Image: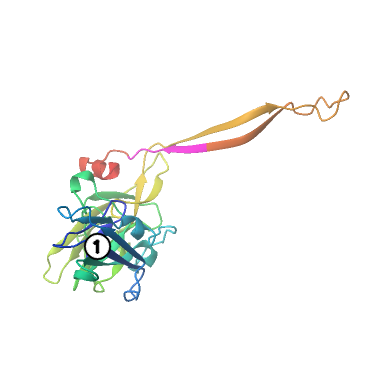
Amino acid sequence: MATINARSPYIVTINETGQIETKLEIYLWNGTGSTPASPAYTLSKKIPSSNNPATYYDVSPFIREYISHASLQSITTITATPSAQWCNVGLKLFKKVTTSFIQVGLTQKHFGLDGYGLYLDGANPVLGNYLLSPSTYTYNYDFSGEYGWLTLYTGSGNSLKYTGLTTGVTSTTLLTNNVWLDVPRVYSAFGAEGNLLEIIDGSANVLYSATFVPKEECKYTPVQVDFVNKFGAWQREWFFKASFDTLNVENTEYNLMPSTYPNYLITEGQREVFNANGKKTIRVNTDWVSKVSKRLLSS
């Protein structure tokens, strides 16, 4: 099944010979249950004209209603990805040639994620089932073992393999077939040295790899940042160098009349503030990064 990245438009096209009207049924549900009996949404359109019969539907706004990243989980072992962070999508396409609708093709089945594609990725980009770009990442070694995780959809017979960067020792775990998982980016025994993380299939082919390197900062306090990345999954990164907090406050002042007169209190305030609003800004510094990492952070 393909993934739909719902922060970009996902356009469904129905263009069949002789159609005069089209209909799209959208089935949405969270978790591993079966397809609901009734669609969550039913959309329909008449064709623009007989010589331009194609109709188009953007399903992304409906998918986003079924995805939430309201809570941040703590991942130190292989864990099922919370069902609220992705959803199942079923699409049934219909055409009307005379008086009734006829389904076009088979029901399409997808996964919905809160990700997005770039303009250069083209229409309806499929970003894959590994929700972190392959690259080299640094992590704060002083941060008690929670170094972040990789969210992925497993294939049949896939395994998770860690290789220590200094010792070369490996640890391999067979993954459950065809489920969404959050796996630690750093194996607990390799926290001090870092590791290469790989996803391999049953024939030992490498499907995904990324390297995670520990770093200790002696001068500044590293700033941890958790965000939903372009793939639609939580990503944890650290900014190691100087950080600056800025607070800008705006308000409206007015002059007060004395509460008593003429024998007013000279210690009573003469001005009052209302409608106070503040905006806090944090400016952080990554330290030196490679060109690849810089591009990933900027996207």
> Residue 184, can we see it?
no
Quarter holding the N terminus is bottom left
According to the picture, the residue beneath numbered tag 1 turns out to be: 22
How many marks the image carries: the answer is 1
Give the image location of residue 31, x and y in percent: 35, 71
Q: Please indicate, yes or no, whether residue 6 appears anywhere in the rendered image.
A: yes
Looking at the rendering, which quadrant does residue 119 occupy? top left
Q: Position of residue 99 (x, y in %)?
A: 24, 69
View extreme (right): residue: 263
Position of residue 55 in the picture relative to residue 74 (left or right): left
Amino acid type at circle 1 is Thr
Up/down of 51 relative to 223, above or below: below
Report the magenta residues as a range: 279-286
In the image, taking residue 20 as reference, residue 186 lies left or right, namely right
Locate residue 215, reporting x and y percent.
32, 47
Q: Identify the residue at horizontal 22%, vertical 50% (top origin).
A: 135
Q: Does the magenta stretch include residue 281?
A: yes
Residue 159, quarter of picture:
bottom left
Left or right: 79 in relation to 247: left
Q: Coloring scheme of the render?
A: rainbow
Residue 299 or 207: which is nearer the viewer?
299
Which element carries disc 1, helix, strand or loop? strand
Q: In terms of secondary structure, what is the magenta stretch mainly?
A: strand
Estimate how packed mark 1 is, as few (under 14), some (14 to 19) or many (20 or more) residues with alpha carbons within 10 Å. many
Residue beneath the point at 39% across and 48% down: 225
Q: Does the magenta stretch include residue 50?
A: no
